[in-house]
Image (tube, grey):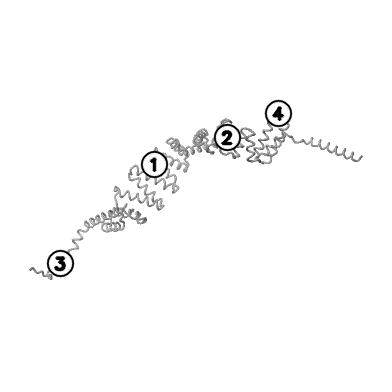
Amino acid sequence: MLKINIKKLIPAILALAVSAPSIAQDAAPVDSSRTSRKHLSFGQRYYKAKNFEDAESQLKKSLEFNPTQGTAAYYLGRLYNDTERYDDAIEWLNKAIELLPENKVSYKNSYYFLGQIHAYLENREDAIAAYEKLLTLSPKREREIQYLHSLVSLSAEEENYEAALEYARKWGELEPDNPEVRDMIAKLAMHTGGAEEALAEKEKVLEMNPNDWETLEWLGNQYKQLGETEKSFDAFSRLHEHHPTNFAYLDNLFDLSQQIGKSNREQVGLLQKMQAIQPENLRVVELLADKTGSLKWINAGLKIDSRSGRLNFLKGDFYYKKWNADSAKQDSVRALNWYRKATADAQWRGNAQRMIDELDPPLSEEEKKRREFFNNSKKKEEVEVSGKK
């Protein structure tokens, strides 16, 4: 049986131990890189399985063996984002950007997740910077639209409407037939004082969707403000056809009909529709009374407000015209009574008093003196007669 002399082997073992570090040192870079990739692979698997604790441990080991392992830094950033450790996520995603080449998908994705995190944390300037960088990385059309959408929203939240409008215009170039984008450009243009651009964009929206009633109403009001009364009248006419019981549409049509010079008959027709919707609306009834001179509408208005100076004056006018036509004394008396009621309204007092003075002219100074003289003479005679008795 072979006997081994341990004592003789000890020097050889010690010699081997002394020389071992230099051999390990020569192999370290290759082994470290390989070991780093092995831990990275395990970390990725754990991450996809949502085993975040083990994934974090493996990814950190990967970086211990190779501190330049950008993919491990990227997945650590993703892991911290998924577990809502946002400060750590930002740190490691920024680290991944330093380490990864630009042509790597994970490099672009690092900016994408940074944009999302900063937007969530309301770090809007940082989020905007991330999405602006993504636009320079040749994204596909769908991704570019997504980034521009985020930039529009973030810039608007920052109240930087000029920047938001520029991003919206770029988005509009990518989707020229998208009515929502055109509408967004219009709204942002209004914020920046570009009324003409807003109007043009809204007209495009209406061309794309002729039954967009909200846009049509916006255009109707805008045309009215710009003095384009015919266009405004056409817009509100369409709106009235779509929604016949909408009082505001009829009110706009009546106002515009006066500006355009529509016939009195058309104006009265609009007022009658308004009165049917709001029978107790005094303004509408007064307008009907004014436009028609009809006692029916005058009396209807006085039932609503018996103190209306306008209606009392109109009722006085009604009897005044009758008196002029028939010369019936009772009509002049009625006219005077209604004009006198109208004087209680300060707004109509002057007009009413002029009509009263026409029907019952005030005495001249000469006539006043003449009457005073005769009155005094009459009193004297009465006194003398009384004395003789």
| Crowd class of label 1 (few under 14; some 14 to 19; many from 20; radius 10 Å) | many
Q: Earlier in the sequence, mark 3 or mark 2?
A: 3
Find numbered disc 1 in the image and state the secondary structure of the residue it sits on. Answer: helix
- Residue closest to the eye, 287 or 156: 287
What quarter of the picture does the C terminus occupy? top right
The answer to whether mark 3 and mark 2 are in CB contact below 8 A is no
Name the amino acid type tagged 4: Asp
Name the amino acid type tagged 2: Gln
Discs 3/2, front: 2
Residue bearing the label numbered 4: 326
Q: Residue at x 58, y 38 (%)?
A: 279
Q: Residue at x 64, y 41 (%)?
A: 305
The answer to whether mark 1 and mark 4 are in CB contact below 8 A is no
Q: Quadrant of residue 1?
A: bottom left
Residue bearing the label numbered 2: 272
Query: Measured from the top left, where is residue 382 in percent x and y?
Result: 87, 39
Residue bearing the label numbered 3: 13
Residue bearing the label numbered 1: 171
| Crowd class of label 4 (few under 14; some 14 to 19; many from 20; radius 10 Å) | few
Find numbered disc 4 in the image and state the secondary structure of the residue it sits on. Answer: helix
> Could you tell me how far apart the alpha carbons at marks 3 and 2 are, in whole angstroms?
116 Å
> Could you tell me how far apart the alpha carbons at marks 3 and 1 are, in whole angstroms?
74 Å
Name the amino acid type tagged 1: Trp
Query: Measured from the top left, where is residue 39 in percent x and y?
Result: 26, 56
